[in-house]
Amino acid sequence: MKRRPHLRNAAVAALIVFTLLAFAIQLPPPLALAQAAIVISPTNPTVSVAPGGTGSTTITVTNNTIPGAVDRTFTITFTGPPAGLTVPNPTSVFIGVGASQQFQINATAASNIAPGVYNVPGTVTGASAGGQGQISLTFTLVVTVTGATFTPTPTTTATVGAPTITPTRGPVCRDGFEGDDNPASAKVIDINTAQERTICPAGDEDWLVFGGVAGKIYTVDISRMDPGIDLSLELFDPDLNSIAFNDDFFNRDPANPNPGDIRPRISIRIPVDGRYYVRIRDTAGRGGVNFFYVVALISESYGPTPTLVREICQDLFEPDGLPEQGKLLTSNELQEDRKLCPAGDADWVVFFGKAAKRYIIYTDSRRYRGRNVVNGETQAGADTVIILTDRDGVSLIDFNDDIPGGNSLDSQIEFTPDVDGFYFVQIKNTGDIGNQFVRYDLVLLLCLPGQTDCGRASVPGTPVVPLTPAPTGTPDNEFNLDPSATPRPTATNTRVP
C-alpha cells in the first residue's frame, strides 16, 4: 500500500530534476547573456584627436528585448587608458526594454603624445532597480592621434615659373603658416608665388589673403595635392562675401581634359581693389601629418576674361534651367543674389496664381552696381528679359524686356490669372550674355485690392551682410592700393524690404 506514494514522489522528483537540467542546458553563460541583452553600435567605436586637443564620438547602447529582459541603468567605464590620453566615463543613463540611448565619448590627448593608434578597454554595465540582475559587456575604444605638435619648420616659397614646383618638406603636422584657421589670422600670399602647406590635423582650415587690383585676373590654383585629401577652394571679397568656389577642376589642359584631376582652381576678374581671402579645406574634413599640398597665386594682368569654373556660376537656386526645375516663388518674396551665369543661362521659377488677384513680378539688379556707375539703374552686363508661361510651362502669356515707362533695363510683368494654378516664369539676359557678375534679385508682389503703387520700389533693398565677422587687426600697408580712395562705411545687418 505504501509503494504507490513512493512511486508518485519519485516521478515528481524525476520531473523536477529533468526540468532543472533542461533549463540549465538552455541557460546561456553570463557572457552570452550580456551579448544578447546589450547591443553596442558601433561595436568598436573610433575617435580621432590631435595632440593637445579633444575628440568625440557617440556609442548607441540598446537594452535588447529578450526573454527575462528588464529595465536597466547603464554605465560605461574605461580602464587603463595609456599615458597621455584621458577618457572620462560618461554619465549613466536609464534605458527601458527595447529602447536605445546614445553616450558621448570624449578623448583628450596630451600635447606631447606620439601619433599613432591607441586601444582603450571599455565596459558597458546594466543593472536593474536595486542593483539586481547586473550584466556587463566589454568593448574597445580605438583612439587615433593624428599628429604631433613640433616646432614649426620653415617652408620654402617658390616662384611660379615652371609647371612643377618641388619645395622641400618634412614630416610635421604644423607648417610654417599656422595658425591660419580664420580670416583674422590669414597669412599673406604674394602674386606669382607658391606655398607648401599641410592640412593637419583632421578638420584643419587654411586661410590666405592677397591684395587684389580691380579689373585684373587672378588664379588661385592647387598645383599639387598629396593622395588622401580632396581639397576645395573658396574666395571671399573684402567684406567676406563668398564670390567663388571650386572643388574639382579637370580642364587645366582644354585640349586634353582629365576627369580624374580633382585639384581645385579658381580664376576670376577682381571687381574692386581690396584684400581678398582664400579658404582651403578638405571636402570630407580629413587631415593628417602626410597631407601636403602646394597653392599658387597667379596674376594675369588685364588679360582676356578667364575661363569660368562652373561652380562660380552656381547660386542658391541652381539647378533651375528647365520649367520642371523651377524653384517656388511665393507671394511677396524676394529671392536675392541670383546669377545669369554662364552664357546662355536661363532661370525658371514657378508661383501659384489665384484667379482675379493681381501679381507683379520683376527683376532688380540695382544693388549689384559696380563702383563705376554708368547707368544708375542697372548693373553692368544685366539686361534681363522675363517670359511668363501658362500652367503647362510652354504656352506664352506675356513677355517684357525693360520696365515700361522707367529708366531701367530690368524687367517687369503684371499678371491677373483667369484660373487658379501654378504658372511658370523664365528669366534670361539679352543676347544670352552671362558671367559671374550678372546678378539680380527676383520679386513677386501680390497687390492689395485697389493698390496703385504696386510695383518695383524706387530704392533697391540693402544687400544682406554675411554673419561671418570681419577680420580684426591692422591691415598690411602693402594693400593700400589707392591712398586717395575714401574709406567705405562699415556694412550693417539692416535690411530694407
Image: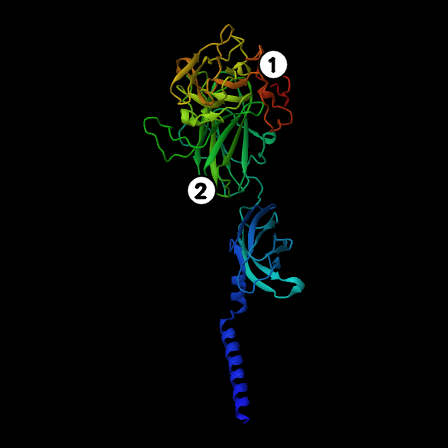
Residue designated by label 1: 483
Circle nearer the viewer, 1 or 2: 2
Which kind of residue does numbered mark 1 sit on?
Pro
Answer whether residue 255 is visible to the viewer in this image: yes
> Would you call the spot at circle 2 few (<14 residues within 10 Å), some (14-19), or many (20 or more)?
few
Q: Assign the N terminus to one quadrant of the image.
A: bottom right
Q: Assign the C terminus to one quadrant of the image.
A: top right
Q: Which residue lies furthest to the front in this view?
A: 1
Depth check: give the residue in front, 73 or 201. Answer: 73
**Where in the figure is residue 405, as x and y percent of width and height?**
51, 5
**Where in the figure is residue 299, as x and y percent of width and height?**
47, 21
**Where in the figure is residue 3, as x and y percent of width and height?**
53, 92
Residue designated by label 2: 228
Taking the spot 55% from the left edge, 40% from the top edge, the residue there is 174
Residue 399 is tagged as: none
SS for dot 2: loop
Vertical comparison of 441 with 230: above or below: above
SS for dot 1: loop
**Where in the figure is residue 12, as x and y percent of width and height?**
53, 82
> Would you call the spot at circle 1 few (<14 residues within 10 Å), some (14-19), or many (20 or more)?
few
Whether residue 306 sits left or right of residue 376 in the image: it is left
Q: Which residue lies furthest to the left in this view?
A: 255
Depth check: give the residue in front, 459 or 303. Answer: 459
Depth check: give the residue in front, 286 or 22. Answer: 22
Mark earlier in primary sequence (1, 2) = 2
